[in-house]
Image (cartoon, helix red, strand yellow):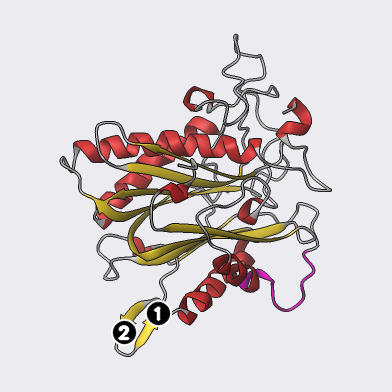
Amino acid sequence: MRSLITDIAGIRVGHAQDRRLASGTTAILFDAPVTAGVDVRGGGPGTRETDLLDPERTVAAIDALVLSGGSAFGLDAAAGVVARLAETGRGFSVGAARVPIVPAAVLFDLLNGGDKAWGRFSPYRDLGYAAARAAAPAFALGSVGAGMGATTAGLKGGLGSASAPVAGTPAHVGALAAVNAFGRVTVGEGPWFWASPFEVGAEFGGRGFPPTMPADAFAWPSKELPGANTTLAVVATDAILTKAQARRLAVMAQDGLARAIHPVHTPLDGDVVFAVATGRVPLADPVGDLARLGDAAARVLARSVAIGVFEATALAAGPPAWRDRHGG
């Protein structure tokens, strides 16, 4: 296992980014359609086709997900992924037509110093297409894809991923997060991550929790423009779930953001968590095992947030990376 979301069989991830633009896109592709749900808690989300994921909606499964920078412009990235999937014959069958089902969510990275003077059409459709073509089981972390232009309070943001078995069940969970938070992922200005109680090995530095709580632990972040944020995430499992159960998994997984970022879910954040189930492992107890899945997903998502910041590298403008400030 790579400790990536792609440890869940049937999932591939691809990135496309432009360092001059200081932005990018991440595509999460599924080898076969998957059951999905979503939980939106940010006060200012930017999304596409999330209504379709409600349990009462007709379409039962999706072909891909897209996380992108670019705010509303970044929603164009989903069209690029749709185009790539259409080339390969994927999509929901409507008579002789096939329509790829690709929900998406975006984060705000328009003021991070990159060149956003793209003219009439944004580059995100092409970035989405390139990300879909690059999708593979192994993928990079840090300042890549949707994490390219991401920032947090005082530190460069990034893209992280992790996975784990679910104790007491035969299932596994994985997570992927693009961390562009208004809040801090560290305890004050120090090197300790809020998610450190959930760290496996030294995947984000092995610093643990501070021996005593620093005075600035809960200080209000100094990040400018509190509306220029959002953390986007996907949690995945190989369990068999209904759409309603996938929605509940997304709800429980949101606790991972609260354990890793302070503060989170602010009025103009667009925080969104998708949950997908590839449907390969039956659950013996639909209620108890789903609770175990949700608990594991929250812990894996908290790890993914910290890993994304730990692996990030700084842009020419903007805050330093964690490694720049605190070492390797």
Q: Quadrant of the C terminus?
A: top right
The answer to whether residue 154 of the structure is visible from this angle is no
Q: In the rendered image of this protein, does residue 118 appear above or below residue 136?
A: below
Packing grade of label 1 (10 A; few <14, some 14-19, many >=20) is: some
Determine if residue 11 is in view.
Answer: yes
Q: Residue furthest left?
A: 284
Identify which amino acid the numbered label 2 is placed on. Answer: Val
Image height check: is 109 above or below 90? above
Q: Quadrant of residue 261?
A: top right
Q: Which mark is residue 94?
A: 2
Name the amino acid type tagged 1.
Val
Q: In this image, 323 relative to 57: left or right? A: right
Q: In the image, which disc is placed on residue 99?
A: 1
Asked if residue 143 is positioned above or below residue 302 in the image, the reply reads below
Q: Is residue 120 magenta?
A: yes
Seen in the picture, residue 139 relative to 195 is either above or below; the reply is: below
Local packing at callout 2 (Cα closer than 10 Å; few below 14, some 14-19, many 20+) is few
Where residue 286 sits: x, y (%)? 18, 43
Position of residue 29 measured from the top left corner of the image (x, y, whole percent): 46, 63
Q: Residue at x 58, y 37 (%)?
A: 307
Residue 317 part of the magenta-drawn span: no
Q: Residue at x 79, y 47 (%)?
A: 315
Reading the chain from its start, which is encountered first: label 1 or label 2? Answer: 2
Q: Secondary structure at mark 1?
A: strand
Give the magenta-colored segment's residue range. 116-125
- Residue placed at 59% from the left, 9% from the top? 211
Q: Secondary structure at mark 2?
A: strand
